Image (cartoon, rainbow, N blue to C red):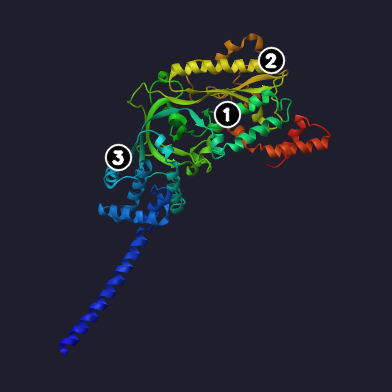
C-alpha cells in the first residue's frame, strides 16, 4: 500500500514536471521566435524565390531552415541578422539553380556547385577591409532587379529611417565608366507595352498645331524622337547649375541600358582613374568597389538636381556608393582589347522658322516637337570605331536635313546639342578626344546651306538661353510625357470653336499653357 502510494506520488510529480517542462519549452520557443522574428521576416521576404516557391508557407519554412543552418555554423545570436543580410545579398547575386526535372544526384551536384560559387565570391571581413561579394560585371545586378526590390522593401519596412541598400560591399571586376546619365526610355515608361507607343505616334503626327501637321517632316520628327527615346539615351554630364553638387557617373557593361550610377566623392577623379585620357572614346574600362544602394532612398543632398530620375520610385534605379570605407574605382587588368560598350551616339537639331525661332517656342510643353534627334547605335569605348561612327552620323544627319529643306519651304535648323556637346554654355565634366559631331558636319553641309543649317555655337550666348541644350533634355522628356494627345485634341477643338476656324499655334499655346495637366 505504501509502495503504491509512493508510485502515485512519483507519477503525479512526473506529470507536474512534464507539464512544467512543456510550458517552459513553449515559453522558450515563443520568446525565441520573438527574438528571431525580424531575422525570419527578413529571410522570408528577402531570399530570392519565384513562382509557387514564393508562397508564404514555403518562404517562412525556408527562412526558419536557413536560420537553423546559420545557428548550426555557430554564428552568435547577435550576429544572425547581419549574417542573414549577407546570405540574402549573396543569393541575389548568385540565385539558387532551378533544379526542376533534375534527379536526386543532379540536384545535389547543382547545389554543390552553387554553394562553391557563393563561397568563392565572398571575401570575409578582416581588420582592415569589410566583407565583399565578387561580381563579374554590372549586368548581374540589373538581371536580378526584382529580387533586389523585394529585399529593399522589407529593409525599408524594418528600418524606415535608414538608407536602403546592401550591407556587404560589391567588388565589380569589370565594366565601363562614362561621363553620362541615362534617361528613362519609352519602353520602360509604358511597361514594355507597345500599344500606347504606337497609338501615341498616330495622335502626334495628326494633331499637331503647326504648319507641318501630318506632313512627312512631322512624321519623321515624331518617329525619330520616339525611336531615340525608346530604350533610353544617355546625356553628358555638365558643370552648369542643375549638375552642381555631386553628379553620379555611368557604370555599365555591354550597353548603356545595362548600367547603374556610381556615386563618388569626386566624379572627375573617377573618370580618370582607369587610365590616360586617350585610352578610349567616351567610355573607359574600370573596376569598382562600393555599397549598392536603392536609388529612391539615396540621400538627395548627395546627388545633383539633374539626376532626379535616380530618386524616382517608378524607375527603381540602383546606385553604387564608392564613398564608403573600402570603396573605389580603378583600372582593370583583364583583356585590354575587349573595349565594347554600346550606346546611342546622337546629335539634335531644332526645327525653326527662317528667322531662327522654334515653331513651338510659345509652350514648354510642346518644345519636344521641334527637336529632331539623329542617332546611331555605336561603340563609345573604342576610339577608332567611335571616330568612324561619328563621321557616319554627321554625314547622315546632314543628308537628312538637306532633303527636308528641299521639301519644306520656311524650315531651317539650329544645332541644339549632342552626346559630345551640352551646348548650355558651361564646360562638360569630360568629353571624348577629337572633333565633335557638330564640327564634323561642316564638311557635309557646305557654306551654301550655312544660313539654313546653323552650326555655330557661342558658349557666352547659347541658343534660346540653353532651353534646348542637353542639360534641358530631362525636362523636355518630362514635358513629352505630360503632353497627352487626348488633352491636346480637346484644346484644339475648344480653341477652334472659340475662334470660328483653325487655331494658330500662338492661340493653341496660350490655351495649352493655362490648362491644368
**Residue furthest out toward the left:** 3
Apparent side of residue 52 relative to residue 424 in the rendered image (left or right): left
The answer to which of marks 2 and 3 sits earlier in the sequence is 3
Element marked by disc 1: helix
Q: Quadrant of the C terminus?
A: top right
Residue 436 in picture, x, y percent from top left: 53, 17
Residue 362 in picture, x, y percent from top left: 72, 30
**Which image quadrant for residue 327?**
top left
- Determine whether 312 is above or below 212 in the image: below
Apparent side of residue 347 relative to residue 144 in the rendered image (left or right): right
Q: Quadrant of the N terminus?
A: bottom left
Q: CA distance from mark 2 to mark 1?
A: 24 Å
Taking the spot 43% from the left edge, 31% from the top edge, the residue there is 252
Q: How many marks?
A: 3
Frontmost residue, 97 versus 127: 97
Taking the spot 51% from the left edge, 38% from the top edge, the residue there is 310
Which residue bears the numbered disc 1?
227
Apparent side of residue 290 relative to residue 220 in the rendered image (left or right): left
Which residue bears the numbered disc 3?
117
Report the disc number at residue 406: 2
Amino acid at each position: 500500500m505504501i509502495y503504491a502510494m509512493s508510485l502515485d506520488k512519483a507519477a503525479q510529480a512526473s506529470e507536474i514536471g512534464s507539464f512544467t517542462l512543456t510550458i517552459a519549452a513553449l515559453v522558450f520557443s515563443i520568446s525565441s521566435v520573438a527574438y528571431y522574428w525580424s531575422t525570419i521576416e527578413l529571410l522570408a521576404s528577402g531570399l530570392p524565390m519565384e513562382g509557387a516557391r514564393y508562397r508564404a508557407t514555403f518562404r517562412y519554412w525556408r527562412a526558419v531552415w536557413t536560420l537553423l543552418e546559420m545557428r548550426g555554423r555557430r554564428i552568435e545570436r547577435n550576429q544572425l541578422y547581419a549574417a542573414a543580410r549577407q546570405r540574402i545579398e549573396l543569393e541575389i547575386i548568385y540565385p539558387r539553380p532551378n533544379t526542376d526535372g533534375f534527379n536526386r544526384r543532379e540536384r545535389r551536384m547543382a547545389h554543390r556547385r552553387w554553394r562553391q560559387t557563393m563561397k568563392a565570391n565572398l571575401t570575409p571581413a578582416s581588420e582592415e577591409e569589410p566583407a565583399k561579394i565578387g561580381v563579374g560585371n554590372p549586368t548581374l545586378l540589373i538581371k536580378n532587379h526584382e529580387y533586389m526590390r523585394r529585399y529593399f522593401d522589407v529593409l525599408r519596412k524594418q528600418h524606415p529611417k535608414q538608407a536602403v541598400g546592401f550591407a556587404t560591399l560589391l567588388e565589380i571586376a569589370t565594366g565601363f565608366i562614362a561621363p553620362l546619365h541615362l534617361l528613362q526610355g519609352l519602353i520602360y515608361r509604358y511597361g514594355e507595352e507597345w500599344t500606347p507607343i504606337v497609338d501615341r505616334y498616330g495622335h502626334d503626327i495628326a494633331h499637331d498645331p503647326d504648319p507641318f501637321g501630318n506632313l512627312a517632316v512631322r512624321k519623321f520628327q515624331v518617329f525619330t524622337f520616339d525611336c531615340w527615346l525608346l530604350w533610353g539615351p544617355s546625356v553628358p554630364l555638365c558643370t552648369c547649375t542643375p549638375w552642381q553638387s555631386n553628379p553620379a557617373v555611368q557604370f555599365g557593361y555591354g550597353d548603356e541600358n545595362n548600367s547603374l550610377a556610381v556615386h563618388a566623392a569626386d566624379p572627375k577623379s573617377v573618370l580618370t582613374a582607369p587610365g590616360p585620357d586617350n585610352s578610349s572614346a567616351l567610355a573607359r574600362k574600370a573596376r569598382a568597389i562600393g555599397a549598392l544602394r536603392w536609388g529612391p532612398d539615396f540621400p538627395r543632398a548627395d546627388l545633383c538636381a539633374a539626376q532626379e530620375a535616380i530618386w524616382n520610385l517608378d524607375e527603381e534605379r540602383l546606385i553604387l556608393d564608392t564613398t564608403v570605407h573600402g570603396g573605389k574605382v580603378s583600372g582593370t587588368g583583364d583583356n585590354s582589347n575587349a573595349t565594347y560598350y554600346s550606346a546611342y551616339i546622337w546629335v539634335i537639331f531644332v526645327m525653326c522658322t527662317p528667322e531662327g525661332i522654334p515653331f513651338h517656342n510659345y509652350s514648354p510643353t510642346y518644345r519636344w516637337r521641334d527637336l529632331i534627334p539623329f542617332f546611331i547605335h555605336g561603340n563609345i569605348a573604342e576610339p577608332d570605331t567611335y571616330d568612324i561612327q561619328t563621321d557616319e552620323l554627321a554625314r547622315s544627319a546632314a543628308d537628312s536635313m538637306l532633303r527636308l529643306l528641299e521639301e519644306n519651304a520656311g524650315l531651317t535648323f539650329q544645332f541644339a546639342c549632342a552626346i559630345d556637346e551640352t551646348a548650355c554654355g558651361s564646360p562638360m565634366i569630360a568629353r571624348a578626344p577629337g572633333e565633335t559631331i557638330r564640327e564634323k558636319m561642316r564638311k557635309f553641309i557646305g557654306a551654301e546651306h550655312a544660313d539654313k543649317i546653323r552650326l555655330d555655337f557661342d558658349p557666352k550666348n547659347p541658343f534660346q538661353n540653353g532651353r534646348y541644350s542637353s542639360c534641358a533634355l530631362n525636362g523636355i522628356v518630362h514635358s513629352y510625357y505630360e503632353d497627352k494627345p487626348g488633352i491636346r485634341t480637346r484644346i484644339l477643338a475648344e480653341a477652334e470653336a472659340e475662334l470660328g476656324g483653325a487655331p494658330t499655334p500662338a492661340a493653341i499655346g496660350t490655351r495649352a499653357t493655362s490648362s491644368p495637366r
